[in-house]
Every structure is written in C-alpha cells, then in structure tokens.
Amino acid sequence: MDSINQFIDRVKQLLQNRLLYISILGIISAGILMIYTFDRVIMPAYTNYNEGVTVPDLTKLSLDEAQTKLEHIGLRYEILDRRAHSAYPADYIIDQSPSPSQIVKPNRKVYLTVNTDTQPTVVVPEVVTMSLTNARIQLENSGLEVGVISMESGRFRNTVLRQSVSPKDTVAQGTVVDLAVSDGLGDEMVQVPDVVGLSHHEAQQKILEAGLRIGQFTYQPDRDAVPNTVLSISPDRGELREGRAVDLVLSESYDAQEVDEAGAVTDDDATPPDPDDLDQIDGVEENNNNEGEEEN
C-alpha cells in the first residue's frame, strides 16, 4: 500500500514539473522542423525541384549533332530503334521521345530513333490456312504490311489461301504481303443431302459433311413430329456449289387447345353435333315454352 502511494506521489511531482512540458514541446518542434527541412530543402535539392529543361527538336539532325546538343543542356540519350527511311541520310534522327518543347528534369534520358543505311530484314511467317484476322496479326507483328486482299473460291470462309511472299523468305522490314482469302464458296458442285425426318443435330452433321453450310432456322408447329425434327429444307433437292447455305424448318410442340380472342377455349379435336340431335333439342325447347304459356 505504501509503495502505491509513493508511486502516485512521484507521478504528481512529475506532472507538476515544468521541465516535462518544455521537453515535450521541444521534441514536437524539432519534429516539425525536420519535416519542413526534408520537404523544402533536402527533397527539392535531390529532385531538382523547380528546375526544368526544354527538350529540343532533334529530328533531321545527325546523331553526333544531337548528342552534342543534349549534353550541352544537361540531358542524356539512348538509341531506341534503327529504321530505314529514304527521306533521311544514315545516322540521322527520325523520331524522339519525349517530343520537342516538353519540360523535363535535368539529366533526363531522351530516346531516339535513328535512320540506318541498311534496311532491317525479317523472316516472312506462313499464314496460309489461318483466318484473315490471325494472318494480319502475324504479319504486322513480324514488321510486314498487309497489302491487297483478294477473294477467291474456297470452302472455308475468310481463310487465307495464298500469300504473295513465300514463307520463311528473308525480306526487308515493311515489305507488303498480298493475301488471297476464301469466300466460303468452293469450285465443286455437291449433292444436297436428304435430312428430312432427322433430328436437328443429325441433319447439321450431314449437311456439313457434304461441304455445305447451315443457314437460317425456322420453327413450325407439328402434331406428330418430335420437337427439333427437320420438316423441310431449302433448297430441298439437286446440287449446290460447295459452301452454300441450307435453311432448315424444324418442328416444335403443338398445343391442341387454342384460346380465341374472346377468351373461350375451343377444342379442335371435338366432334360436331349430329343435325338430328339438334332437331330433338329444338323440339324439347318448344314444348317447354308452350307449357309455360298455358299455365299463364
């Protein structure tokens, strides 16, 4: 108990000491001063704050002239790419990044594209049997350009049939490659298969195996056929050019009961009443009416 009281007394004496508050205030002030100095003095000196260099226009200059100009204003350079350009002499600047007139930090690196007197070469990829989209991507990624695209007869639509530059040839970068692409229509005439009565899946397989394409689907109610059974096709006979489309008419479930516009339910399978039965009903109704009049 005495030790607790002594501890409390010491705490009270410490809190009443002015030196404690002066020390805390000094620590806070020193922290603020350090943060201010770091932000306003150290970091600006390290990052060259408020200093900037205007990037000059280096295009149409030789590499030596560009190097001298950049070193004079405190910038560096790096050759990013070498390309062949007929409008520039060899070792002249074609392009640069950052672009001219931009403000950058001192000692910043400027990336240069330099003209070369030797044309870079690439190996032509094989794009035959590829789709037109994939062929275009392959050629452009190889540094080639897609030229004239002509359509020719072929079974598989938008598939490359021929290329003007042979695969694996070494050519100049930027060479134009023309492509011949299939229009989806072959040269041969094929027989239209008989698929009436088959299921949708079976009919589709037979049509594709014959070298034809699947066209449009339409559905028609049918009482007897299983749903998705082929009822008819168009064209339904003869021969077609390879790759042509065949349209299918498929069955769908048929509901025997139909609701008319007034909301009454009619049964299409109902048997109409016999005329003799209708005469008997009319006779009974007349007798009932006569009996009612006599009572009155």
Image (cartoon, rainbow, N blue to C red):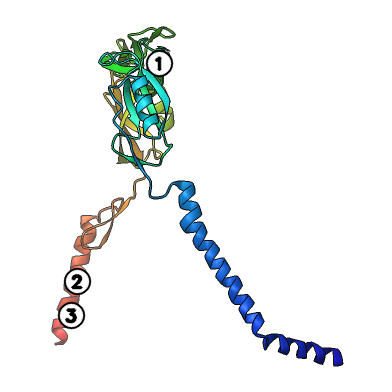
Q: Amino acid at mark 3?
A: Glu
Residue drawn at point x = 72 percent, y = 89 percent:
13
| Horizontal relation, residue 97 to residue 25: left or right | left
Q: Which mark is residue 46?
A: none
Q: Which residue is mark 1?
A: 127
- Number of numbered discs: 3
Q: CA distance from mark 2 to mark 1?
A: 89 Å
Q: Position of residue 21 (x, y in %)?
A: 62, 81
Q: Position of residue 26 (x, y in %)?
A: 59, 73
CA neighbours of label 2 inside 10 A, class few (<14), some (14 to 19), many (20+) = few
Visible in this render: residue 195? Answer: no
Establish if 119 lies above or below 37. Answer: above
Q: Which residue is mark 3?
A: 291
Question: Can you tell which quarter of the image residue 118 is in?
Answer: top left
Visible in this render: residue 10? Answer: yes
Label 3 sits on a secondary structure element that is helix
Q: Which mark is residue 285?
A: 2
